[in-house]
Image: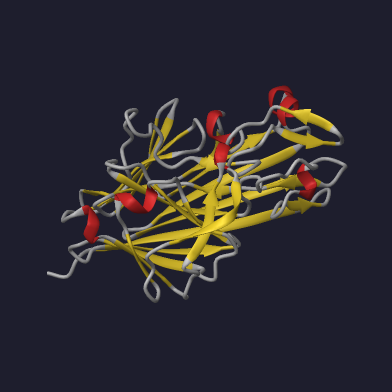
């Protein structure tokens, strides 16, 4: 394990993971010299794998809590905050974030959030833990937003695909003005459990699987290399890219953007979790890399 004031680097065999204190964001993950995460490019998207909390997605007009509006923005504030490195070993790091006067101005709750990364020679586990440290029920949502290289190891962009563990709907919500979940749906070119990736798929923003049936999937490139992903207690999945960009985000969420027309309390927003005082929620994802067969 290597550490500096701003980041930690984990090693396991030929695997390497770099995690920044800012946002507890994974900045690089490689195995055997093969880079798997997008490296960021401001021309398309400057982030690599942000952590989403205490909301996921777009908001129509901040959030309303106890009748008062709070100016919370896209995906919440965790990705812009410096986490504290609480524990660090060769293959594991835990980063922690707690409420302060700045977070309470946006989200008036006492909380503690930890992000654990565990690196193996061929896999990476990420665990989010959210705790309510206040005296009132606390609504929250969290999510993972990693951007993987597209293509992953080579070959054409249009020959990559997502293979879900279960059959998913061939119709997904239209993303309405402002990034909200629209009332209408649109078709996607899914065949069985396989969804081909193309720039056209993302021409109108993200592809969101609300209440997905799958709790795992494989991202497979033209050469047959794949990243297999398993999700625990993330009911929603999303895919996102920008035309011509060298990444595809494969996201796992507990919540989602405001539905079109929603203007109620945060606690009443569809898919928000509510923690009783002293309770916590745990959400886990595991990513494993499978090189192409020789």
Q: Is residue 26 visible?
A: yes
Quadrant for residue 282, please give it. Answer: bottom right
Residue 13: x and y in percent read 28, 54
- Quadrant where the N terminus sits is top left
Q: Residue at x 71, y 32 (%)?
A: 99
Query: In the image shown, does 36 or 92 lie closer to the viewer?
Result: 36
Query: In the image shown, does 85 or 294 lie closer to the viewer?
Result: 294
Quadrant for residue 82, please give it. Answer: top right
Q: How is the image coloured?
A: secondary structure
- Quadrant where the C terminus sits is bottom left
Query: In the image shown, does 95 or 225 lie closer to the viewer?
Result: 225
How many numbered circles are shown?
A: 0
Left/right placement of residue 157 relative to residue 193 reads left
Left/right placement of residue 159 relative to residue 194 reads left
Residue 160: x and y in percent read 26, 60
Q: Residue at x 81, y 49 (%)?
A: 278
Quadrant for residue 97, please give it. Answer: top right
Q: Residue at x 79, y 47 (%)?
A: 267
Left/right placement of residue 31 relative to residue 234 reads left
Up the image or down, 289 lies above or below 256; here it is: below
Residue 101: x and y in percent read 73, 23
Left/right placement of residue 103 relative to residue 250 reads right
Q: Residue at x 87, y 42 (%)?
A: 135
Q: Is residue 109 visible?
A: no
Up the image or down, 15 lies above or below 266; here it is: below
Query: In the image shown, does 231 or 207 lie closer to the viewer?
Result: 207
Up the image or down, 127 lies above or below 113; here it is: below
């Amino acid at each position: 394990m290597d550490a500096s004031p701003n980041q930690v680097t984990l090693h396991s065999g030929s695997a390497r993971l770099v995690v920044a204190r800012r946002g507890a964001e994974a900045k690089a993950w490689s195995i055997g010299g093969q880079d798997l995460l997008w490296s960021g490019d401001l021309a398309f998207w400057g982030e690599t794998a942000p952590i989403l909390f205490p909301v996921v997605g777009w908001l129509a007009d901040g959030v309303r809590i106890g009748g008062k509006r709070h100016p919370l923005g896209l995906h919440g504030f965790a990705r812009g905050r410096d986490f504290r490195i609480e524990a660090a070993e060769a293959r594991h790091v835990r980063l922690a974030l707690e409420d302060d006067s700045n977070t309470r101005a946006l989200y008036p709750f006492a909380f503690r959030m930890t992000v654990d990364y565990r690196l193996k020679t061929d896999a990476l586990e990420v665990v989010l833990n959210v705790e309510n440290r206040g005296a009132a029920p606390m609504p929250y949502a969290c999510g993972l937003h990693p951007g993987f290289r597209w293509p992953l190891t080579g070959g054409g962009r249009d020959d990559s695909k997502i293979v879900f563990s279960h059959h998913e709907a061939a119709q997904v919500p239209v993303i309405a003005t402002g990034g909200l979940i629209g009332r209408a749906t649109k078709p996607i070119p899914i065949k069985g459990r396989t969804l081909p990736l193309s720039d056209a798929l993302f021409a109108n923003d993200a592809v969101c699987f609300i209440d997905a049936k799958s709790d795992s999937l494989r991202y497979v490139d033209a050469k047959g290399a794949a990243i297999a992903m398993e999700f625990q207690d993330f009911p929603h999945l999303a895919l996102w890219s920008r035309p011509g960009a060298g990444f595809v985000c494969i996201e796992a969420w507990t919540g989602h953007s405001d539905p079109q027309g929603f203007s109620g309390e945060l606690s009443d927003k569809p898919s928000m979790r509510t923690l009783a005082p002293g309770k916590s929620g745990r959400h886990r994802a595991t990513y494993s890399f499978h090189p192409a067969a020789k």
